[in-house]
Amino acid sequence: MTWLRDYLLEPAPPGPDVRRADQVAEPTHLAAGPTHLAGGPKGQPRAVVPTARAALSRWLAPRATTVPVAATVVAPTAAVVGAGSEATAFGAALALLLARRHGSPSAVLCLAGTGLPAWHVPAVPAARRGCAALRARGFPAQASGRLVVVAVGAEPSAAAVGAGRALAAAGAGSAAVLVLAGPRDPAFDALLSHVDLAVAAIPAAAPASLAALALAGLEAAAPRAVRAPAPVAGLGRALASAGVMVTPAIRRAVVDAYELLS
């Protein structure tokens, strides 16, 4: 009976690995044990008989899985040309809408020709981190709401260089809007040629000839340009500039440009 006991209870030796390729190796702590089979009555080797322990380990072993690598989503960039506070509010609203659509917790608003907004609110963590990164590079920046606002000065040549650096620091995954407050200077043409959309934010009461001239200038520099109404003064403009929210009235002013970037 000794050989029958050994035959039934002793673990089988490891044979050729015939498991599927998508199964992992048998855990060593489950497979531990003697690695030979007792011979039969006449010393003949017996066929490999899987033990219950080995079968259980195969059944419980997790299958190898492949974790997909998420593709980097490139957020669009835009430039807004117009009067100081009007262009700032338009650019801020556009940046907020683009960030929401692309799942980004914050957006970058780069201001040339005007300073940082006087009114700001506590910022979300992502905006605070982005602001700290820009400050570490020497930019005057502030975080407000979901916006990272950076001012690059008023002198066109230096501001154009600074804006290029700030937009590059924002990264491809962050929505970024450049605001050119005041007349467009040729120093910014190189930047305008790389944005996805340039917007002439013109007050509704402005003469048609002025709007046509502003749009023609942008069309000569940017691959795509559009005219849009400048948002009127009010609480909505302040909320957008502070990175808080885009009110329905401000959204109506921005919606055409926003849809072109869809």
Image (tube, rainbow, N blue to C red):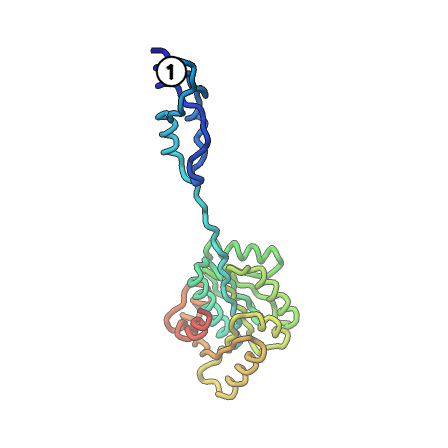
Residue picked out by circle 1: 6
Check the picture and name the quadrant holding the N terminus: top left
Q: Amino acid at mark 1?
A: Asp
Residue furthest to the right: 157
Front position in the image: 108 or 174: 174
Count the numbered circles shown.
1
Residue furthest to the top: 1
Q: Residue 235 placed where, x, y %?
A: 40, 70
Front position in the image: 215 or 24: 24
Label 1 packing within 10 angstroms: few (<14), some (14-19), many (20+)? some
Callout 1: SS = helix
In the rendered image, is residue 122 in sight? no
In the rendered image, is residue 155 in sight? yes
Residue beneath the point at 39% across and 16% down: 40
Front position in the image: 80 or 206: 80
Residue beneath the point at 64% across and 74% down: 187
162 up-or-down from 8: above or below:
below
Front position in the image: 142 or 48: 48
- Quarter-of-image position of residue 159: bottom right
- Quarter-of-image position of residue 238: bottom left
